[in-house]
Image (cartoon, rainbow, N blue to C red):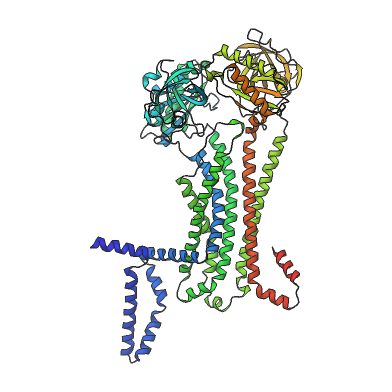
Amino acid sequence: MGLWRQLTHGIGVLTGRTHADADIDAELRQYIEEATDAYVASGLPLDEARTRARRDMGNPTAVREQVRDYGWENTLSALMADIRFAVRMLRKTPVFTIVVVFVIAVGSGAVTTIFSAMNAVVLRPLSGVREPARLVALQPLDRQGGVGEQGSFELYTWLKERSSTLGGVAAWGRVSLTIAVDGRGAPALGNMVSANYFEVLGVRPAMGRFFSADEDATPGAHPVVVVSHAFWTTRLHASADAIGRPLQINGHPYVVIGVAPEPFAGVYTGLRPDAWIPLMMQPQLWPRSNLTTASWLWMFGRLRDGTSPQSARTELAALAAARRAERDPRGDAMGSMLATRLTGLPSGEGGVILGFMGMLMGAAALVLLIAAGNVASMLSARYVQRSRELAVRAALGAGRIRLLRQLLTEILALFLLGALGGFLVARVATAVLERLPLPGNVPLVLDLSPDLRVLAFAIGVSLLTGLVFGLAPARQAARRDVISRLRTDSAGSGSRRTIISRTMIIAQLALSLVLLVTAGLFVRALDRARQVDPGFSLDAVTAVSLEPEAWGYDEPKARLFYSSLLDRVERMGGVTAAACTGRVPLTMGSSRQEITTGDGRTAPIDYAAVGPGYFSALQIPLMDGRPFAESDNQSAARVAVVNQTFARRLWPDGSALGRTFEFRGLRTTIVGITRDARYASLQESTPAFAYFPLAQVWQPGQTLLVRSAAPDADVAAAVQRAVLAIDPARPVPRIGTLREATAIVLLPQRVAAWVTAALGALGLVLASAGLYGIMSFSASRRTREIGIRMALGAERASVVRMMVFEG
């Protein structure tokens, strides 16, 4: 029976029908009866005695409110009553409710959309892994303290054998693949991983199994592959018998042994692998690298239970010191090891991206402030209209705190609905953003959709904003000047409220102007960046990305392929120049190498390997010497063409033409000097840059650049036919214009300009709507004043002019 009473009492609290109400009424009746009896006993008539007893008790409504303030059950009951009343009041004015919720949803949606993107890129933990907070990225430091993201296989095995704070150390590297299913090949993104890669991450297969220890022992002995859930769904048609199915990867036979679970998308945000292959297959899939000593592996580990990240850092520093002590210091450039949280972003990029997102978040927050100020103005006007109602409630005994609590409940209900609307706005906005194409065929796949964390953020920010911006109008409305509010409803009675509302509108317009000026600055910066001379011509050039190594070609076969392709392309109608390059300029890439001059000086340089015709294809002017020729082949003397900065820095007192330096241990002669250009980005300070012949500095992955007077679409179709004519089994290459490929360098400025311009326009619309609302309300409140002015002779035009000037 006790449990039943508690249950019925709880239901009564939630529905507003509690035993407490009946008990309070009974106590009040008993008090009046006892007081009446006392006055009757003193000789007063019954009616007068009852009147005095009621006067002594005071306002029964106020007494009930005071009693209800005690006890959590009564507090909860009062809260539920406030919520029910707030819902009724909002339903009575649907137009006001819809407009306010819409304005809040717009402001909240702007902030929530940016936070959702920030959450997806920076804050969200790796999906599909166990206890992601215990995963740490392991990065070698050089002797100067610089961070290098990648290490060698030898370093990986050395750490795995010696670390005691890490329950496991795994390694992986990226590789370009061409996977053929039923004879049809298509490019794919692959990861070569250590056998314990999935084990350290805590990932379980959706089908089949992951790699075993023996598949991490012998190079080239285990051609097996684990495919992603997306690859299994799209390319293998979600076949139940996918395990054991043969595939052709880079022209070699492989067998599917497992399918990764659907949420798992690797350890780099946005770069979703299609397949994972054992590290020991590197000699077959990436033969130009070295399995043991080359630094091409990313490493990560899992902290043991009870181990702190600081303990791991201390141990890694000690291990690095021991490694230096047991080796020839000149033979090991590693200084120490860094252990940071595995976030899915490259080293150092998290802070940059977070700063950029924070800037956009600040712009979105201004829109939310504008929307909140707009709502505060509308609430202030609404409370002027409800002044008599509030005065009556105060006269009936409702205290200021009681009225304030009721008004804040209504305000928070509006902002809660606005937060839910903002969450829906963010879902739509992020879905649109996910479908926008990235420049330069960037292979990023981002899931920007908001999750529960984003929903909690939207609700928290909206409620906090509602409390901050709703408190002032609510306090003003709840003030206890009952008599004046009941006696007058003149325009002047709301003068202070009008001043507050107009101040808010001025602030909104100022904030929207800040957004528009910021957007203008970004647009101007974008325009100036577009006008920067890159040092070469971007127009009328088609770029074709080619990966013959991913097709299973060895170096001789790849060289023959490029030679045949160039011969076909140069004979096309309208083609004026064609060349291959191992590095496309202005695509955010870098290639750094240290050289030694003839007199023993060392200097860092950036470089690119290019083919004959490169300078003609990009129209890079040659200031001195000659360009590369077909005779600059493997058997010829090593040569280079350098830029003006290279020549000035290393030989400031004379010409660099004919001088020599040592590059990768080989003596190289400078045969030409080109004009300075932009190489990685438009904002970089010009580096010392050298070009080397592709025939002498071989790179299998190349981009074909074709300058032609023909339309871009015709050139792309002709190049595609030329590639398939040489090898019909190859996948269709990625083809676009050079301007499209280099658009990546302006992506941050473009995003900033688009976002701030959109937010600025949105803020201006909201501020203008608020201005219209406050002026309309002011005009309606001044009807009597306007009538008196016109009765005294004011013309219609002068009245309109007065209101317009105020606006």
The residue depicted at 40 percent of the width and 19 percent of the height is 216
- Residue 337 position within the rendered picture, expressed as x and y whole percent measured from the top left: 48, 26
Name above or below for residue 237 compared with residue 7: above
In the image, 2: left or right of 576? left
Quarter of the image that includes the C terminus: bottom right
Name above or below for residue 154 compared with residue 208: above
In the image, 662: left or right of 31? right
Name above or below for residue 449 compared with residue 5: above
Of residues 479 and 589, the one nearer the viewer is 589
Image quadrant where residue 381 sits: bottom right
Q: Can residue 260 be seen in this view?
A: yes
- Residue 604 position within the rendered picture, expressed as x and y whole percent measured from the top left: 63, 21
The residue depicted at 63 percent of the width and 9 percent of the height is 634
The residue depicted at 65 percent of the width and 26 percent of the height is 716
Q: Which residue, as the protein is rendered here, is positioned at the far left?
A: 1
Q: How many marks?
A: 0
- Residue 541 position within the rendered picture, expressed as x and y whole percent measured from the top left: 69, 26
Image quadrant where residue 622 sits: top right
Of residues 463 and 151, the one nearer the viewer is 463
